[in-house]
Image (spheres, grey):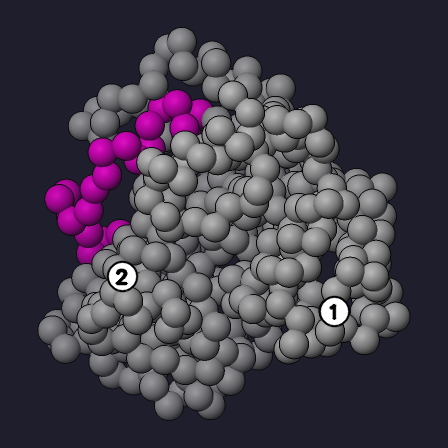
Amino acid sequence: MNAQDIIALEQTYLAPTYKRAPFVLERGEGVYLYDTEGRRYLDFVAGIAVNALGHADARMADVLAEQARQLVHVSNLYHTAPHALLARDLCEASFADRVFFCNSGTEATEGALKFARKWARTTSGDDEKYEIVTFSHAFHGRTMGALSVTANEKYRKPFEPLIGGVRRAEFNNLESAQAVIGEKTAAVIVEPVQGEGGIQPATREFLQGLRRLCDAYGAALIFDEVQCGLGRTGTLWAYEQYGVEPDLMALAKPLGGGLPIGAILMRQTIADALAPGDHGSTFAGSPLITAVARDVFNRIRDAAFLAHVRDVGAYLGEQLRAVAASSPLVREVRGLGLMWGVELVERVAAADVVAALWSHGLLTVPAGRNTVRFLPPLIVERTHVDEAVAAFATVLAHEVTA
């Protein structure tokens, strides 16, 4: 089938919830993708921060095939080795004592909110201790609970009323947070680096202040590291750069290297409030997915791998700032590791820039209305950065009408 036939099928039979690019991707290799017409694209989206090891990784394929020949799925009614080993590895490499596996980032958020509410009520004995505090520009997912703590009204409004008890404060404004955190607060949820909200890193003072407020009011601190975790910022966990540890943390995107998996990491105090039947998932923690995820995780956590992310990430930031210095269309460049956003002047839509880059063989993704997001696979090299930044600079200089 040609590309137009495939696109016609999608438009006929799939729910119209996505606006897709006008080409059909067929295969990938490393940091490149190829469409059905043979065109090559440098991938600086990585499946929206998912494909940490790039495309068609041979070792990942071997692990997947080997496990598929042994055991794919049995449900959570039975013990299997892969999910137990992955849970151990995650706990030993983090603040956590326990793990709950799920299938996506939004499910990780949902579970973390549930666990925090039960913990807060159990430990306080107060049925009114259920409020969740979230922040401006936050994005935590699209299911009903996760959507309730997401900031953008465009996502929330069509589906209201959502869950109650959600209070909002301004991101990176500790006084604003202090005004809404109190005795009824069960949890505070925050992204150490906001992704969809425009690649906005939290300040050290802000996260440390939230930790103090949560401790003072007996609330759980939840970090959403679905996009910024697992090596993306140059350390295994983004929170390591802030000197703050959470009580719960939501993970997903890169953990499966492209296969669907989420995880909720938690302290033992949170786990102590849980009992069999409190939460569940038919497909979560399957031996197939967790076997692959364990291999992906242990490759990402390698010190040399993370050093590479920091080196190439710093180089990407330097090159993007050089473009900003020469372009009147750029307002600000922000990021950590291999997670960067270029905020354009208000009159320039990021989606228009992203679309213009397709003809230059570069895939990027918007973050909000006017920020272009750069999220390459973590295996990217400096030569790939040069290729991407050159295309970006060309589009800003010659193809964007301000």
Residue 41 lies, in percent from the top left, at 70, 37
Residue 54 lies, in percent from the top left, at 64, 34
Of pointers 2 and 1, the one earlier in the residue sequence: 2
Q: Secondary structure at mark 1?
A: loop
Identify the image quadrant of residue 248: bottom left
Foreground residue among 124 and 373 = 373
Residue shown at 60% from the left, 20% from the top: 59
Q: Secondary structure at mark 2?
A: helix
Residue shown at 75% from the left, 65% from the top: 400
Q: From the viewer's perspective, is 347 left or right of 111?
A: right
The range drawn in magenta is 271-291
- Is label 2 in contact with label 1 (beta carbons under 8 Å)? no
Residue shown at 66% from the left, 33% from the top: 33
Look at label 2 and name its amino acid. Answer: Gly
Q: From the viewer's perspective, is 118 left or right of 304?
A: left
Q: Which residue is mark 2?
A: 145
What's the distance in space between the residues labelled 2 and 1, CA to CA?
A: 40 Å
Q: Which residue is mark 1?
A: 401
Mark nearest the camera among 2 and 1 is 1
Residue shown at 72% from the left, 33% from the top: 40
Look at label 1 and name its amino acid. Answer: Thr
Location of residue 304 with respect to 339 vertically, above or below: above
Identify the image quadrant of residue 58: top right
Task: State the quadrant of the C terminus.
Answer: bottom right
What label sits on residue 221 in the rendered view? none
Residue 355 lies, in percent from the top left, at 65, 53
Location of residue 374 with respect to 129 vertically, above or below: above
**In this view of the protein, can residue 332 be seen by the observer?**
no
**In this view of the protein, can residue 145 be seen by the observer?**
yes
